[in-house]
Image (cartoon, grey):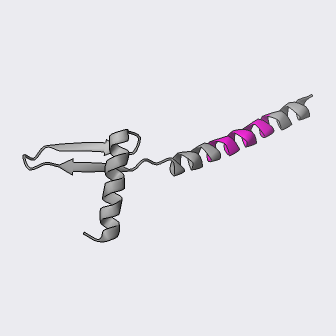
Amino acid sequence: MKKVLGRLVLLGALAGAVYAALYYLREESAATEAIQMVFDDGSTRSLTSSTTEGKEFIDIARKIVEIGL
């Protein structure tokens, strides 16, 4: 009985390690992009790619970088 319990604990620890590694890798790939706009009066506005406005501005910024301005 003790041997079976020990193996179950080891199997559970291994499964937890695999789950933690997969969660970490998924979070790495789900990183969001962000853009920060600075206006003439010195105020700023930050937008992330998780918002509709942010997606539009990030696409525009990406195209500007591709053009080389």
Q: Residue furthest bottom?
A: 68
Q: Position of residue 47 (x, y in %)?
A: 31, 43
- Is residue 23 visible in the rendered image? The answer is yes
Identify the main secondary structure in magenta: helix
**Which of the 4 image quarters holds residue 15?**
top right
Magenta stretch holds residue 10: yes
**Which of the 4 image quarters holds residue 12?**
top right
Q: Position of residue 69 (x, y in %)?
A: 24, 69
**Which of the 4 image quarters holds residue 53?**
top left
Q: Would residue 30 be found to the left or right of residue 60 on screen?
A: right
* Front residue (pair 22, 44): 44
Say if 28 sits above or below 11 in the image. Answer: below
* Front residue (pair 10, 37): 37
Which residue is drawn at the image coordinates 90% and 33% (left, top)?
4
Q: Would residue 12 be found to the left or right of residue 55 on screen?
A: right
Magenta stretch holds residue 52: no
Which residue is drawn at the image coordinates 78% and 34% (left, top)?
9
Q: Position of residue 44 (x, y in %)?
A: 18, 44
Count of picture labels:
0
Q: Residue furthest left?
A: 41
Q: Which residues are magenta?
A: 9-21
Q: Residue furthest top?
A: 1
- Is residue 48 visible in the rendered image? The answer is no
Which residue is drawn at the image coordinates 92% and 28% (left, top)?
1
Say if 39 sits above or below 9 in the image. Answer: below
